[in-house]
Amino acid sequence: MVHLKALGIKAIAIGLTVFSLFGLFYNANLTNLFWISVLTTGITYLIGELFVLGRFGNVVASIADFPLAFLSLWLLGVMFIDAGIPIVTTSLIAAFFITCCEPFIHTYITEQLAVERKDEDESSSITGQLQTEFSEEFEADIVTDTKEINDDK
């Protein structure tokens, strides 16, 4: 469920950026902009969040998201939009805005996954509920008393 919410947040951020920038500069078809948004979200989520974030952390994942977003926007823009002006500049600007949102998405994912793992650990194990019981040993007194009697003989 955490990944679904994070994917939705990421899709909204990428969708707003793609629809506003590419729609403004290229007057592109809404269907093409939708597919660019969906594919860019999928590519950057699979590689950036699931692979890089889990292994290297927030900073590296945020840095890696810029070239991922740029390359996917650039290639998909060339495929879906027939433009007279270069798409590279718009892809760079869009990738910058998307990358500015990424640390917040990464923080959300890591915090929610930590809470989810903590809940799973607490429900699956009872180690947190164990207590130590202290008591006086009555048999120890008997053993020491008999030992003293044996030593006196």
Image (cartoon, rainbow, N blue to C red):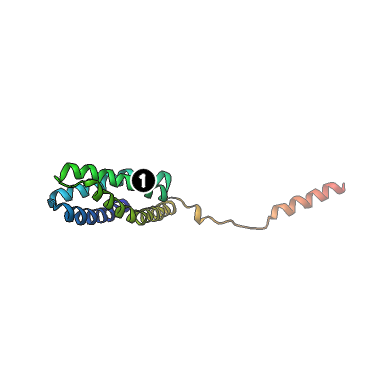
Q: Secondary structure at mark 1?
A: helix
Q: Amino acid at mark 1?
A: Ala
Which residue occupies 34% across, 55% down? 100
Structural crowding at the residue carrying mark 1, measured as other residues with C-alpha within 10 Å and reported as few (<14), some (14–19) or many (≥20) = some
Give coordinates of residue 82: x percent, y percent: 14, 45
Nearer to me, 118 or 87: 87
Q: Is residue 2 left or right of residue 17?
A: right
Q: Is residue 76 left or right of residue 146?
A: left
Q: Is residue 11 left or right of residue 80?
A: right
Count of residue discs = 1
Which residue occupies 28% across, 49% down? 92
Give coordinates of residue 120: x percent, y percent: 40, 52
Which residue occupies 25% across, 49% down? 89
Nearer to me, 12 or 126: 12
Q: Quadrant of residue 67?
A: top left
Q: Quadrant of residue 97?
A: bottom left
Give coordinates of residue 133: x percent, y percent: 60, 57
Nearer to me, 36 or 106: 36
Give coordinates of residue 126: x percent, y percent: 47, 52
Find disc 1 in the rendering and name its residue. Answer: 64
Q: Quadrant of residue 64?
A: top left
